[in-house]
Image (cartoon, rainbow, N blue to C red):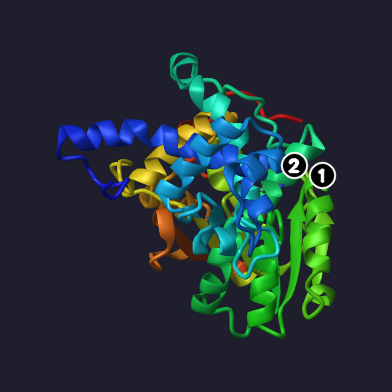
């Protein structure tokens, strides 16, 4: 099949794209049932043995395994025995040599039903699952934060190597989730001390992840904080806001950026890492689709264009706003800005120019 994110040019490509749901559900189901884990790194099992291990019907399991072999997640030998393919051995078996993605797939499971109700969301303008940032239930919190760790483990070493934090000593990783960014920046910059600010339920998971990093854990502090209402601490030389602004309504985003302006040292560096779109909001296609993901799962979240964010940042007194496209997957990129010098800091209030367009749809949750 052709690249998923490019415009279809034939009717067959339209059909292929509609059939992607088969692929997704086969992959999520195999992961959920433990098929990749059961085959492990060296395993080679026929359908009967595999079905016994994952407690499934042998005939049905053989259909699933054949499909997965056709898709390249498994291999099948002449004796009908299945094994994990190289990519599955590396990324779908925990403890493999690559970043483990099984947690990411377990998190995607949570989105299947809400996406099935997309029509309801589009008609009502409301989410189709609780807009609770996965904080109501510890199993969901764990899946959410472990999923963020899975993707960040691929992405963060790359970002930490490309963003220059030289000469900066304190980093706030705001809504830092698993703390993966804080870990990689601390590894890259031995002088840096990082504070991960996040909700208490999330930090339970962060604690486990950071404790597995003996070389940097002493330089990483976990600060329980609801950034909608708590003090952020500081001053910080750098504030990283990764995958945060898409999850909240415009009013909350603006208040967070204003709080950060005040929590940053003069000439502090703000890094907003997200799925930004061009001004038309249609490309990159993944970023536009991701806005729908926020529609079904948050209260007022969306994706932002660079122009929209630049306008808000400049209205708040930030300067040198730049869009850094570093060649990351799915259109991920970074918008950087410099906080005002001490004598330039505007009064602590939202700029009048952008206030009307940034009025909350509903009062902020308390
Ligand atoms: C999509 S995750 C991003 C995690 C991490 N920054 C990354 O890029 O991998 C969003 C994070 O924001 C946190 N979060 C959401 N609302 C928050 C709030 N009001 N205060 C603090 N953290 C919040 C969540 O707990 C979660 O860790």
Furthest residue to the left?
Answer: 10
Q: Is residue 123 above or below residue 23?
A: above
The answer to whether any part of residue 340 appears in the image is no
Residue 315 location in percent, x, y?
47, 51
- The quadrant the C terminus occupies is top right
Up the image or down, 256 lies above or below 77; here it is above
Above or below residue 363? Residue 313 is below
Q: How many discs mark residues in the rendered view? A: 2
Q: Tag on residue 141?
A: 2
The image quadrant of residue 58 is top right
Q: Nearer the viewer, residue 115 or 93?
A: 93
Q: Is ligand 1 less than 8 Å from the beta carbon at label 1?
A: yes
Instruction: Give the residue displayed 66% in from the left and 83% down from the top.
Output: 189
The residue under label 1 is: 201
Q: Position of residue 336 (x, y in %)?
A: 48, 65
Q: Residue furthest front?
A: 79
For disc 1, the neighbor class at 10 Å (few under 14, some 14 to 19, many from 20) is some
Identified at 47% across, 64% down, the residue is 319
**Is there CB contact under 8 Å for labels 2 and 1?**
yes
| Res. 153 image quadrant | bottom right
Cα distance, mark 2 to mark 1? Answer: 7 Å
Q: Can residue 85 be seen in the rendering of this structure?
A: yes
Q: Secondary structure at mark 2?
A: helix
Q: Residues within 10 Å of mark 2 (few under 14, many from 20)?
A: many
Answer yes or no: disc 2 within 8 Å of ligand 1: yes
- Of the two numbered discs 2 and 1 in the rendering, the one whose residue sits closer to the viewer: 2
Where is residue 168? Give x, y as percent. 64, 80
Counting residues from the start of the chain, the first of labels 2 and 1 encountered is: 2
Where is 132 relative to 207, above or below? Answer: above
* Residue 15 found in image quarter: top left
The residue under the point 43% across, 63% down is 328
């Amino acid at each position: 099949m052709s690249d998923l994110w490019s415009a279809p040019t034939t009717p067959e490509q339209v059909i292929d794209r509609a059939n992607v749901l088969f692929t997704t559900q086969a992959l999520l189901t195999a992961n959920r049932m433990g098929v990749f884990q059961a085959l492990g790194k060296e395993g080679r099992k026929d359908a009967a043995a595999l079905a016994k291990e994952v407690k499934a019907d042998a005939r049905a399991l053989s259909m699933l395994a054949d499909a997965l072999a056709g898709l390249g997640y498994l291999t099948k030998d002449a004796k009908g025995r299945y094994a994990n393919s190289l990519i599955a051995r590396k990324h779908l078996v925990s403890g493999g040599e690559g970043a483990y993605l099984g947690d990411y797939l377990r998190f995607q499971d949570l989105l299947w039903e809400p996406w099935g109700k997309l029509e309801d969301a589009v008609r009502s303008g409301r989410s189709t699952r609780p807009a609770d940032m996965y904080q109501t239930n510890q199993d969901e919190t764990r899946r959410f934060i472990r999923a963020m760790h899975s993707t960040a483990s691929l992405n963060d070493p790359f970002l930490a190597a490309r963003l220059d934090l030289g000469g900066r000593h304190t980093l706030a990783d705001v809504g830092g989730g698993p703390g993966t960014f804080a870990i990689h920046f601390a590894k890259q910059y031995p002088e840096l001390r990082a504070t991960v600010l996040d909700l208490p339920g999330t930090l339970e998971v962060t604690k486990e992840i950071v404790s597995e990093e003996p070389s940097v854990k002493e330089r990483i502090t976990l600060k329980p904080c609801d950034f909608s209402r708590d003090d952020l601490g500081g001053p910080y030389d750098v504030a990283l806001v990764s995958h945060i602004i898409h999850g909240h309504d415009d009013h909350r985003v603006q208040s967070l950026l204003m709080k950060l302006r005040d929590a940053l040292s003069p000439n502090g560096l703000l890094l907003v890492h997200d799925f930004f779109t061009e001004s038309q909001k249609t490309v990159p296609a993944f970023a536009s689709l991701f806005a729908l993901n926020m529609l079904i799962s948050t209260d007022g979240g969306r994706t932002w264009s660079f122009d929209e964010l630049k306008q808000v940042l400049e209205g708040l007194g930030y300067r040198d706003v730049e869009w850094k496209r570093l060649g990351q997957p799915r259109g991920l990129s970074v918008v950087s800005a410099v906080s005002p010098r001490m004598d330039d800091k505007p009064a602590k209030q939202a700029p009048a120019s952008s206030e009307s367009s940034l009025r909350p749809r509903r009062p902020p949750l308390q």
